[in-house]
Amino acid sequence: VRSAQKTRIALSYGRAIRAGIGGLRPTVVVALRSEELTRQSTGPTAGVFGVRLGIRADDKAPSIPITSAEVYLGGRTMNHALSAAGVEGGFDVVFGWGGFDEDTRASIGMRAPVEFVAQTPRTRFTIFAAPAMAWGNIRMRACDDLGPGDNCGDLGIQLAFGRTRFVAGGGASLTMLPSRISLAVGVQRLFATGETERAWMGMSWTP
């Protein structure tokens, strides 16, 4: 925050375990995140851009082991950089794809992360929650021409969205500031039939 702008890049590695019909399926989560910090009169803020890939990590992985991908962009308040503790907020727009090895589906969502951050000269502890709302199974489908306003188009196709879904997630992280290594654990729940809680853990390093 001493300069007008500063870019931070973080590389992350995590493992997500999903309980399903086939039992536990370990997934490696590889992520790249960039933050561009800007000083404002009301305090520092950051523009955020990130990419995540979910990669099937067991011996039954198909020829294309990537199971999901996510691109997100948004903003954060960063007032904890100027104080020992504080509450931060943000907003993301998220674009996702899943089911590459079965039936590819696209989705779009909005996420509103909230964090409580407490730090000392050597450590930073964070408790966070990230409620989200998303629309999945975005696709083009055939439609009947019913006249003006039917969103059908000249080609007889229209853009269709799946059901609105809600996702709740949260957890905690600890960062060792001299090394800039962070350890995080959390849980996530998609509110849909057949879905269960998913626990995850991860580690990241910020150069």
Image (cartoon, rainbow, N blue to C red):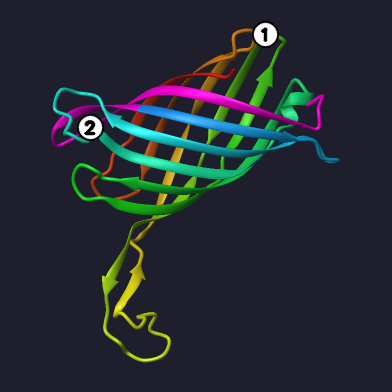
| Residue situated furthest bottom in the rendering | 147
How far from the left and from the top, in percent, is residue 45? 72, 37
Give the mark nearest the N terminus, 1 or 2: 2
Residue at x-position 82% and y-position 40%: 40
Res 98 → quadrant? top left
48 relative to 133, above or below: above
Disc 2: CA contacts within 10 A as few (<14), some (14-19) or many (>=20): some
Label placed on residue 122: 1
Res 153 → quadrant? bottom left
Disc 1: CA contacts within 10 A as few (<14), some (14-19) or many (>=20): few
Residue at x-position 16% and y-position 29%: 23
- The CA span between labels 1 and 2 is 37 Å
Circle 1: residue type: Arg
Q: Which mark is in front, 1 or 2?
A: 1
- On the rendered structure, is 184 left or right of 25? right
Per the image, label 1 sits on a secondary structure element best described as loop
How far from the left and from the top, in percent, is residue 57? 24, 24
| Residue situated furthest right in the rendering | 41
How far from the left and from the top, in percent, is residue 13? 41, 22
Residue at x-position 27% and y-position 79%: 143
What residue span does the magenta drawing correspond to? 1-28
- On the rendered structure, is 16 left or right of 134? left
- On the rendered structure, is 110 left or right of 35? left
Q: Which residue is mark 2?
A: 19
The stretch drawn in magenta includes residue 14:
yes
How far from the left and from the top, in percent, is residue 130? 51, 39
